[in-house]
Structure formats: C-alpha cells, structure tokens
Image: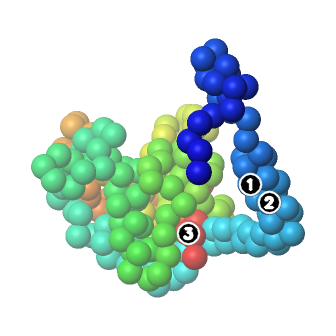
C-alpha cells in the first residue's frame, strides 16, 4: 500500500488547499434525508392556570410565617436582608406551588408585573389571592398584598412595606376599609401545572 499522495494533492497541500472529499457531502445528504423522513413531535408547554384553593391557602399560611421580617426595597432574600411586597408574593407562592406540584411561570416580578402578566383578574378575592394597590388618587399599581379576609368592613391582608410614620417596617398584617381607593384590583396568581 502506497502512502504517497498523487501530484495534484501535493500541489494543493503546498498551496494550502485541502483535498476534496465527498464524505462530508454524503454525510450531510444522509442526515438531511433522515431528518426529512422523521416526524418531530413537539408538545408546547401547558398554559398557566389560576392557583387552586390549596395553593392559595398554603401561600397565605406561609405569608403569616413571614410576619416580622424587615422591609427592603427590591428584596427577595429571606436572610440576612429583608423582603419587599412582590418578593413576599414570589417567595410564598414559589413554596406553595412547589409543595402542590406546580411551579411559577416567573422567577421575579414587580407588583405591576404580577397584575399585568402573572395573575387573572377577580371581582372579589378569596384567602390567598392578591390585592393590587396604589396611591388613592392614581390608577397605577405600585404595591401588592395577599388577601386574608374581610371582618367588620375591614379588608385584612399581609404585605411588606415601609411606612415609618406609622411604625411599619416589613411584613405585617394590616387592614383598610373595604372599598378603600388604594385597592386597585384583585387577582389570582397563575401557575404552571
């Protein structure tokens, strides 16, 4: 068996041109032919669903456990820093969803993002649903809380906020009169099955 290259190959190598091979062309043809005869089955992800009662209940129970944690704007860390309103919602729903076989279709969200994208609107909340809030004289959603109940005309909720003049710094149980203009909307968190 000869190891010598034909003259034309030596010339090509001398000029830096690699020998022409039909193997890549044949391989590419075989791959294309194989793929064209295959049926690719693609299952799109299931659409998000509104959180069922058991998830909402677990989220509310978890939110109660956060009472007393300090507020930190943009905070989602439990330790050593604090947590803000949307961080509270994300953390409690992350856990409640996971223990009930669901997941969140987001990793982080603002109050407005939860309102606009990651919840379904409600006329009246049930325990564990979201209350979207903002300044009384404005329509913008700037705050989110977790609905607990209505007692004696007061809507009770759990949230994380910082209102130093009221002595509020962090996660607490608060209430406003039902129908207060700071309540902008109600929503149910969307989950991925």
Q: Nearer the viewer, mark 3 or mark 1?
A: 1
Judged by depth in the image, the label closer to the viewer, 2 or 3, is: 2
Q: Which mark is residue 191?
A: 3
**Marker disc for residue 188:** none
Q: Are marks 1 and 2 in contact (CB under 8 Å)?
A: yes
Q: Residue at x 74, y 54 (%)?
A: 27
**Residue 25 placement, left or right of 105:** right
Which residue lies most toward the left here?
A: 80
Question: Whole-Å distance between the Cαs marked 2 and 3?
Answer: 43 Å
What residue would you read off at disc 2? 30
User: Could you say where residue 26 lies in the image, as x and y percent from the top left?
Assistant: 79, 52
For label 1, the crowd category at 10 Å Cα-Cα, with few meaning under 14, some 14 to 19 and many 20 or more, is: few
Q: Residue at x 40, y 58 (%)?
A: 90
The quarter of the image holding the C terminus is bottom right
As rendered, which of 46 and 100 lies closer to the eye? 46
- Give 172 or 181, whichever is nearer the viewer: 172
Discs 2, 3 touching: Cβ within 8 Å: no
Q: Which residue is mark 1?
A: 27
Residue at (64% x, 24% y) in the render: 10
Point 63% across, 72% down: residue: 49
First along the sequence among labels 3 and 1: 1
In the rendered image, the vertical position of residue 139 relative to residue 123, given as above or below: above
Image x and y of residue 112, in percent: 54, 44
Instruction: Tell me which corner region of the image, top left, top right, bottom left or bottom right, holds residue 6.
Output: top right
Q: Position of residue 59 (x, y in %)?
A: 39, 72
Q: Secondary structure at mark 3?
A: strand
């Amino acid at each position: 068996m000869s190891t010598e290259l034909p003259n034309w190959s030596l010339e090509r190598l001398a000029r830096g041109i690699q020998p022409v091979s039909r193997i890549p062309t044949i391989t590419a043809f075989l791959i294309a032919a194989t793929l064209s005869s295959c049926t690719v089955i693609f299952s799109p992800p299931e659409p998000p669903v509104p959180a069922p009662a058991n998830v909402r209940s677990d989220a509310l129970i978890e939110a109660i456990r956060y009472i007393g944690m300090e507020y930190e704007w943009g905070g989602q860390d439990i330790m050593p820093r604090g947590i803000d309103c949307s961080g509270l919602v994300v953390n409690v729903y992350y856990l409640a969803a996971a223990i009930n076989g669901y997941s969140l279709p987001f990793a982080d969200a603002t109050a407005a993002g939860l309102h606009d994208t990651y919840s379904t609107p409600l006329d009246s909340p049930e325990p564990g649903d979201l209350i979207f809030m903002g300044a009384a004289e404005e329509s913008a959603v700037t705050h989110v809380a977790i609905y607990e109940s209505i007692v004696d005309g007061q809507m009770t909720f759990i949230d994380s906020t910082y209102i130093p003049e009221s002595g509020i710094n962090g996660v607490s149980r608060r209430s406003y009169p039902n129908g207060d203009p700071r309540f902008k909307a109600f929503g149910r968190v969307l989950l991925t099955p």
